[in-house]
Image (spheres, grey):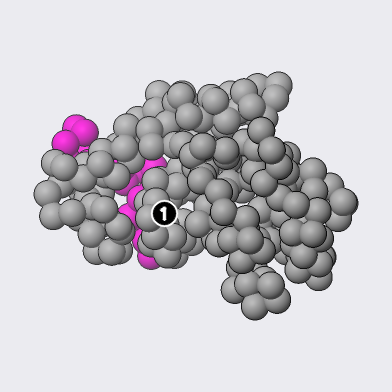
């Protein structure tokens, strides 16, 4: 398959990214996360599909955190009651795609399933301890996609990057594809995901001496500034 990112396009990206090398940091490793933080990350990864802001609030707003604590969610008598509760919370947060019918809310349904998966593994920390035991990043990605509902290419990679369980992959989303479009690269996320990931790692991250994971965070967090430079 021919390359999507030309040398000149890669050079433009490296120039735009270089100034942020020392300004954007990766988050703390998963071993420093509490069970509550890990749970909110897993729930938030489904919530952010289609719109990031509600997921960020769920993960970082202290008032909302109490509404999705391990103890709180374990208190519901069955999956239907928990799904109804999460649907109401998601609707209040203006989460995209939740709709008006809690029975048809696939985000709430996936969140119930994922919460139960974490608990069945012995809790969030134990679940990610099992994931961390996988030898390769590819195996960790596959493990998340298999175990957690609504975790695709982006969701699995984003979670692993955030938890410092992956450093050579990228969670390609609309912002990163927006940056690529700005330099003249038009690609389809589904068809060539791994090739775009590899080219960004080899042509942009490695020449800059940074991990692909850090490149991912820079492009995401400094999206507006980088678009202006390009």
- Residue 93, x across and y down, in percent: 30, 63
Q: Dot 1 lies on which element? A: loop
Name the residue at 38% across, 33% down: 149
For residue 94, what is the image quadrant? Answer: bottom left
Residue 76 is a magenta residue: yes
Q: Residue furthest bottom?
A: 228
Is residue 175 visible from the viewing direction of this image? yes
Q: Is residue 213 left or right of residue 8?
A: left
Q: Which region of the structure is painted magenta?
A: 63-82
Image quarter where the N terminus lies is top right
The residue nearer to you, when weighing 88 against 37, is 88
Residue carrying label 1: 48
Against 224, residue 119 (above or below) is: above
Against 22, residue 133 (above or below) is: above
For disc 1, the neighbor class at 10 Å (few under 14, some 14 to 19, many from 20) is some
Name the residue at 71% across, 21% down: 135
- Residue 82, x across and y down, in percent: 22, 41
């Amino acid at each position: 398959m021919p390359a999507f990112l030309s040398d000149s396009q890669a050079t433009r990206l490296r120039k735009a990214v270089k100034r942020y090398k020392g300004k954007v940091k990766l988050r703390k490793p998963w071993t420093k996360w509490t069970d509550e933080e890990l749970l909110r990350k897993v729930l938030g990864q489904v919530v952010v599909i289609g719109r990031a802001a509600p997921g960020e609030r769920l993960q970082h707003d202290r008032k909302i955190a109490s509404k999705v604590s391990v103890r709180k969610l374990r208190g519901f008598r069955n999956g239907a009651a928990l799904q109804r509760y999460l649907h109401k919370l998601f609707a209040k947060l203006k989460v995209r795609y939740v709709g008006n019918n809690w029975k048809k809310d696939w985000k709430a349904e996936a969140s119930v399933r994922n919460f139960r998966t974490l608990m069945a593994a012995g809790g969030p920390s134990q679940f990610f301890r099992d994931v961390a035991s996988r030898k390769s990043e590819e195996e960790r990605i596959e493990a998340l996609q298999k175990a957690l509902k609504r975790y695709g290419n982006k969701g699995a990679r984003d979670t692993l990057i955030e938890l410092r369980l992956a450093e050579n992959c990228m969670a390609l989303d609309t912002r990163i594809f927006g940056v690529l479009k700005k330099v003249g690269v038009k690609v389809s996320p589904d068809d060539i995901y791994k090739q775009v990931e590899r080219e960004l790692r080899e042509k942009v991250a490695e020449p800059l001496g940074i991990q692909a994971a850090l490149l991912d965070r820079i492009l995401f967090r400094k999206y507006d500034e980088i678009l202006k430079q390009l």
